[in-house]
Image: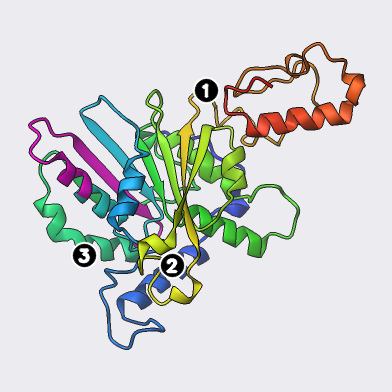
Amino acid sequence: MMMASKEKVSSAKQNDKTIDFWDTFYKDLNAGVNANEEQPSNNNDLEWIVSDKPVVLDKILSFFPITRQPSMHILEIGCGVSQLSRSLLERMIRQQGDEKAHHAYEFVSTDVSLVCLQHNRDRDAAYIASLPDTSTLSYTELNVVKELPACQMHKYDAILDKGTCDTFLFRSKRTQKGSAAHAPLLKPLLNNVHRLLRSGCKAKYIIISPRSKLKSVRDFNGFVSVNRTKMSTDLLGDAVLVKGNAAHKPAHVFIYECTRNDSYQPDKDEPFADEGLSAINDDTICKKCQKTFKEFRGNVDIQDQGVIQWTRRFRNHIIHCTGTCNN
């Protein structure tokens, strides 16, 4: 079977120890081993970051790409025991109502933990069996920072991430002592997200996070735009964070809408806008607006403000350009 090009990040991949940690974590949950519970629980109300309230689901759905295709394919990465995919599918089917021409929806919810995947299958078995023939919901193993099967490439209209990017950033902060601008796991994660998203439909990578800034996501050349929406947790009542963590409730949660850059090539291009810029010259180009360094300066002599100042300005332009910048 053909595989995607292998990233040179073997030391950053999720190893067996990490996967064992999550298996143990979910086994403990299924056994009711929770600091805030004395009795076993089915954990149906366990959600990372934010729960599946209608206001949250509708906001996420508003970011889904508009497609004329008869079917829509949605992938969730790092699902844990979340019901996000199921809740979104239920809402999409309900919103179709009595329309004669129903869309077909395929939700594939994935994780590295076989324990949590089986938990989800058992929990949602009756619901999955009741779905109309046009829609499916499945729980499948996927390590999103490893090589991908060719059959998964360029398949999905939207990818959901509620906690995966945050987990990789947290792990990198705890384990990396260098001064790298971007966490090592973010390169294979974002490159694989790009490979999984379908081209030609403004496919979206949608991240739900408590973080107000995601620098690596913002600077990733594989997106033509990254838009952030802030939601006050006061509007969500007690729906925020995993149960038992109410004391750590943040003031806001953030939803990032990242639109695929179809011209980006993961196996050839620099992944981040601030990498590969140490030697800027007149022909260096901003890949988002196609403007060269010389065009960016216009008729101004580079010596007027100095090479360092102009180089810094152009580097910032490349990082923040939306593809329509005039300067």
The secondary structure type at the circle numbered 3 is: helix
Q: What residue type is labelled 1?
A: Ser
Q: Vertical placement of 82 versus 309: above or below?
A: below
Tag 1 and tag 3, C-beta contact below 8 Å: no
Residue 113 visible in the snapshot: no
Q: Vertical placement of 275 versus 13: above or below?
A: above
Closer-to-camera residue (53/162):
53
Task: Tell me: 152 left or right of 184.
Answer: left
Crowding around mark 1 (Cα neighbors within 10 Å: few <14, some 14 to 19, many 20+) is some
Here the colouring is rainbow
Give the magenta-colored segment's residue range.
91-114
Q: Residue 52 appears at what percent x and percent y?
A: 31, 58
Q: In which quarter of the image is the N terminus?
A: top left
Closer-to-camera residue (253/148):
253
Rounded to the nearest angstrom, the CA distance separating label 1 from label 3 is 41 Å
Rounded to the nearest angstrom, the CA distance separating label 1 from label 2 is 36 Å
Q: Residue 195 appears at what percent x and percent y?
A: 46, 34
Q: Which amino acid does label 3 sit on?
A: Arg
Residue at which label 2 appears: 22
Q: In terms of sequence position, does the residue under pointer 1 or pointer 3 come before the other?
A: 3
Point out the frontmost of discs 3 and 2: 3
Crowding around mark 3 (Cα neighbors within 10 Å: few <14, some 14 to 19, many 20+) is some
Q: Residue 197 appears at what percent x and percent y?
A: 41, 34
Tag 3 and tag 2, C-beta contact below 8 Å: no
Q: In terms of sequence position, does the residue under pointer 1 or pointer 2 come before the other?
A: 2
Seen as rendered, the residue at the extreme bottom is 38
Crowding around mark 2 (Cα neighbors within 10 Å: few <14, some 14 to 19, many 20+) is some
Residue 123 has which mark?
A: 3
Residue at which label 1 appears: 263
